[in-house]
């Protein structure tokens, strides 16, 4: 079982958002005229809004992934096949305590 810090997750989400090909940047000098009656409305979404929208989408996906991991672990516990590497647990506890003692969150 590998435990990662929050910073790794945040940078991963940030990178996924930046690599998203479905979002095109707003073009400079775009048409700002008001559409006439009956014409479809056109909106421009800022880069920050697209970033937040993608972050929310990825966060929702993260819940599904986490739920799947929890279900898998529960199943392994019920079957008696769940194994934990005590060395990794000890390393994680030591890292956590060192961070706490150094004043990091």
Image (cartoon, rainbow, N blue to C red):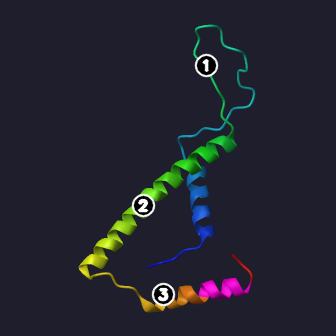
Q: Position of residue 25 (x, y in %)?
A: 65, 38
Residue drawn at 56 percent across, 87 percent down:
93
Q: Pointers 2 and 1 in contact (CB under 8 A)?
A: no
Q: CA distance from mark 2 to mark 3?
A: 22 Å
Q: Which residue is mark 2?
A: 65
- Check if residue 33 falls in the magenta segment: no
Q: Which residue is mark 3?
A: 88
Q: CA distance from mark 2 to mark 1?
A: 37 Å
Q: CA distance from mark 1 to mark 3?
A: 56 Å
Mark 1 falls on what kind of element? loop
Q: Position of residue 100 (x, y in %)?
A: 68, 83
| Residue at the left extreme of this rendering | 79
Is tag 2's residue or tag 3's residue first in the polypeptide sequence? 2
- Check if residue 98 falls in the magenta segment: yes
Q: Position of residue 92 (x, y in %)?
A: 54, 85
**In this orientation, does residue 54 appear?**
yes
Of the pair 47 and 82, the residue shown nearer to us: 82
Q: Residues within 10 Å of mark 2 (few under 14, many from 20)?
A: few
Q: Quadrant of residue 38?
A: top right
Residue drawn at 47 percent across, 78 percent down:
2
């Amino acid at each position: 079982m590998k435990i990662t810090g929050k910073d790794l997750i945040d940078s991963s989400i940030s990178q996924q958002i930046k690599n998203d090909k479905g979002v095109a940047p707003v073009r400079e000098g775009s048409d700002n005229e008001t559409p006439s009656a009956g014409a479809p409305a056109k909106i421009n979404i800022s880069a920050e809004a697209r970033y937040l929208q993608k972050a929310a989408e990825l966060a929702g996906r993260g819940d599904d992934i986490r739920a799947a991991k929890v279900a898998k672990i529960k199943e392994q516990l019920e079957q008696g096949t769940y194994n934990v590497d005590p060395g990794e647990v000890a390393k994680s506890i030591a890292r956590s305590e060192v961070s706490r003692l150094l004043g990091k969150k």
